[in-house]
Image (tube, rainbow, N blue to C red):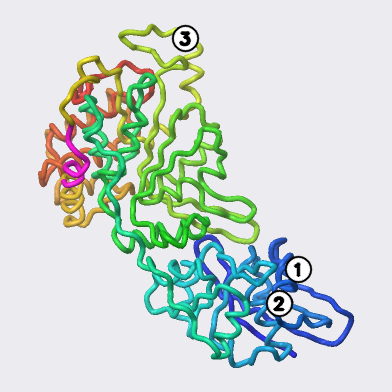
Amino acid sequence: MLARVRSAAVIGLDAVPVDVEVDVAAGLPAFAIVGLPDAAVREARERVRAAIRNAGYDMPARRVTVNLAPADTRKVGPAFDLPIALGILTATGQLPETAVRGYVAVGELSLDGTVRPVAGMLSIAQDLRSAGVRGLLVPESNAPEAAIVCGTRVCPVARLRDAVRALCGEIPFPPVPPHAGGLPETSPAVDFADVRGQAHVRRGLEIAAAGGHNVMMVGPPGSGKTMLARRLPTILPPLSHDEAIQVTRIYSVAGHLTARAALVTTRPFRAPHHTASAVALVGGGAIPRPGEASLAHLGVLFLDELPEFRRDALEALRQPLEEGRAVIARAQGTVTFPTRCVVVAALNPCPCGYLGDAVTPCACTARQRALYLSRISGPLLDRIDLYLEVPRLTGAELTAQHAGESSETIRARVMRARSRRCAARRSAVSHPAPAGALGGRDGRLDAAVTALLRGAIDRLGLSARGVERVVRVARTIADLAEADRIGADHLAEALSYRALDRPGRARVAPGAPSGV
């Protein structure tokens, strides 16, 4: 007898429908799975056989053939265990054929029949909600995640036997567990009020948060680079519902969600170790998975000790930083992961970390410093918008009793600047745009501002991309100042953040126009 159960496969961030066709025929006992299954899918034979038997049903001693259609789509992971088991029970008459009609089933089976959670449930619920689905049979732990999508009937199942009984109408499906709508945003454990001194760095990070600009911080060990970077998410605006869905979808595919926190409601902060590979940073692998840049989507990607990262890993970040997406091409197809995040890089000025320090002398040779900084390519540096020097704090600054501005106060200014940006129909995220479209509200720069910019191009040797980014930063500074047009002071401040266009150049005091 032939049975058919609907399921789904996750490819990249998208879900595609899969028909699980089960044929039980006479012949020597065998269990074959076809349709481009990977090793985890092929191993479903043993899991399904034991789960059916331990759930109290009969596993047929006949020839069982399972086809996962369409056959030209790669099937990955254990999510097909539940539909395969339901198909076998239907094909052997232990479950009525009408019982599974219209349902989409997804879930991994334990040997005792327990239904275990799988990755990518939010993508499945979103992409299949308009496909005439009667209900979505999901593991109980995945139910809150699937219930985030409106218009989808979620049917949680904890065990195979419970799923069969509920489909037959003997018992109702249990209600969706709480927290289906996600947890409310909680107060962050860190705050900018904890930071002492570093006023110009705080200002630079505020500009970065308001405009979605990439930042590089250069300073000796212990000057506060990591502390400042970890507080950047606290001044970013809260995630909207649509943004939370985007981030949650990435974390769902990556398998980073829990039943309690079904919806990501805070801005991500990712800080990969400098031993991370290119695949770990950008995404990919034989079965493409999102990397750290995608897990930081709409949040912050912190690259501490930047020169210690592998050269190929850093170079792989160039396209994602420029385009806001990582395109992973494989023989089976191409997948795209979003990577719109604020990149914060931190490094020491030299291998020992004390070049230019007023207290500890540098012990590095000129060759050592050159080799250290040469690990970062010019094209990658060209994609950084703000260079911030983080000097050693004085004793008076470290022991100051008064707190600085709180994250809440800074966030309010950032949100006002972004509101002005949105009102003018400009993107508030880190996406490049033509420089001419970023001047005043009419898209033009004043003559004095244009003259200042021309001088900066010649003096600093700015590339076309560098000019574009300077103007974008100036536009953000103008938005923070609630100005309709970019003024000379806004552009001068933006140019001051390009003074460290290459690490190791002569330092320029923050706020100064770099001699232009």
Decide: is 108 above or below 403: below
The secondary structure that dominates the magenta segment is helix
Decide: is 144 above or below 442: below
Circle 2 residues within 10 Å: few <14, some 14–19, many ≥20: many
Residue 409 in the magenta stretch? The answer is: yes
- Quarter occupied by the C terminus: top left
What secondary structure is found at the residue carrying circle 1? helix
Tag of residue 46:
1
Read off the residue under disc 3.
Answer: 364
Residue 425 in the magenta stretch? The answer is: no
Q: In which quarter of the image is residue 513?
A: top left
Residue at image position (78%, 85%) is 24
The amino acid marked with disc number 1 is Glu
The amino acid marked with disc number 3 is Cys
Q: How far separated are the C-alphas under marks 3 and 2?
A: 67 Å
x, y (%) of residue 281?
A: 51, 43
Circle 1 residues within 10 Å: few <14, some 14–19, many ≥20: few
The segment highlighted magenta reads: 404-412
Tag of residue 494:
none
What secondary structure is found at the residue carrying circle 3? loop
**In screen coordinates, is 71 left or right of 294?**
right
Residue at image position (80%, 75%) is 31
Q: How far separated are the C-alphas under marks 3 and 1?
A: 61 Å
Comparing 404 with 416, the one in front is 404
Q: How far separated are the C-alphas under marks 1 and 2?
A: 10 Å
- Quarter occupied by the N terminus: bottom right
The amino acid marked with disc number 2 is Ile
User: Looking at the image, do the residues carrying marks 1 and 2 touch, with CB atoms under 8 Å apart?
Assistant: no
Tag of residue 52:
2
